[in-house]
Amino acid sequence: MQINALIVVEKVAMLFLAMVFGIYARLRGFVDDAGTKTLSKILVNVTSPLLIVSSFQLDFDPRLLSDGLFILLGSVIIHVAVTFLGVLLFKWQKEPEKNKILRFALIFGNCAFLGYPVLNVIFGEGVGVFYGAFYTLMFNVYIWTYGITMLQKGKENAEKPSIRKILLNAGTIASAIGMILFLTGTKLPSFVGGAVDLVGNMTFPLSMIIIGSLVATLDIKKILTNKSVYVFCAFKLILLPLIVIGFSKLLSLPPVLAYMFITMCAVPSATNSAIFAELYDCDSKLAAQCVGVSTVFSMATLPAMIWLAGIIL
């Protein structure tokens, strides 16, 4: 599999420009905190699930299914491995609240908002999100179990992981529906499929508007003096994908799996890092800094890692 790194750079640059539009909207007051949260809810519960369902509207292919199941297994291994890696990497951060945020932001990457568009460039329209949906199945389960448990550690009246939230969140439901349609060879009626495609395709620009809105709220002076954020970005955007590239080469992974895992490990921190930190009364400012700064830096590091993978693999 040959990946044209220049095309990836072009697409990532396009996403970056879309994020700039989000920054502009926030600075001009067209979007505020409440508006950003509303847009996030629409994305998580409407556009992204429809995008996932649309991605499964492919002719049944045993090879695609086999690749997807391997990606799911790889996602489980990666999430668990990064959990232990985070404990080791952030031992130097002795403040419990900051430590848990850095580890949370390392584990949970922006797989859907930024990962899906890049995967579409690498694997083609539809197939990229199809593969990505298998990877994010573990993401959804892990963030609602280990993720919230970690954020609530040491707090009174901690909420227990909810089976309902684990199994009945929009992403998991959409993946299940899409999988049923794929396995049975069922195609949505043209007018339904068209509407699903139309709304689902809003996910990419909408996600970048949301990220831009979050970036616009960052205090540049505090970021410039916060060494923790720079160290975090080095671990998240450089060290982690380099480790995955190394293991991909060592294990001679098929190109489909290698590029899938490298891309998902090279994306910046998920916006959920800031959202969940706010929800569970953690250091949401540090979380927002990790999300914003890693997103900006990823515009350079993400295509660089894919380019490097093309050379090494």
Image (cartoon, helix red, strand yellow):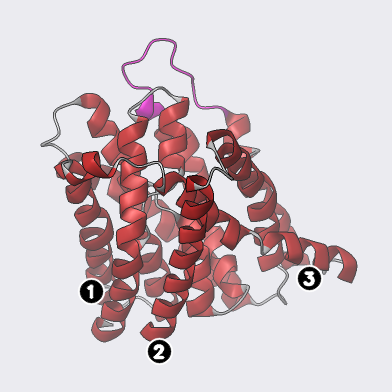
> Could you tell me which residue is drawn at 72 percent across and 67 percent down?
182
Residue 280 part of the magenta-drawn span: no
> Could you tell me which residue is drawn at 45 percent across and 58 percent down?
73
- Between the residue at mark 1 and the residue at mark 3, the CA separation in whole angstroms equals 37 Å
Residue 38: percent from left, percent from top = 63, 39
Q: Is residue 262 visible?
A: yes
- Between the residue at mark 3 and the residue at mark 2, the CA separation in whole angstroms equals 30 Å
Residue 151 part of the magenta-drawn span: yes
Instruction: Say whether residue 41 is left or right of residue 183.
Output: left
In this figure, which residue is indicated by the disc labeled 2? 2
Give the residue type that dot 3 points to: Gly
In this figure, which residue is indicated by the disc labeled 1? 250
Label 1 sits on a secondary structure element that is helix
Front residue of 134 and 299: 299
Residue 53: percent from left, percent from top = 70, 60
Q: Do callouts 3 and 2 mark residues in contact (Cβ within 8 Å)?
A: no
Quarter occupied by residue 276: top left
Which one is in front in this view, the residue at disc 1 or the one at disc 2? 2
Instruction: Say whether residue 307 is left or right of residue 142.
Output: left
Quarter occupied by residue 190: bottom right
Give the residue type that dot 2 points to: Gln
Per the rendering, the mark at residue 185 is 3
Residue 18: percent from left, percent from top = 51, 63
Extent of the magenta region? 148-162
Front residue of 90 and 145: 90
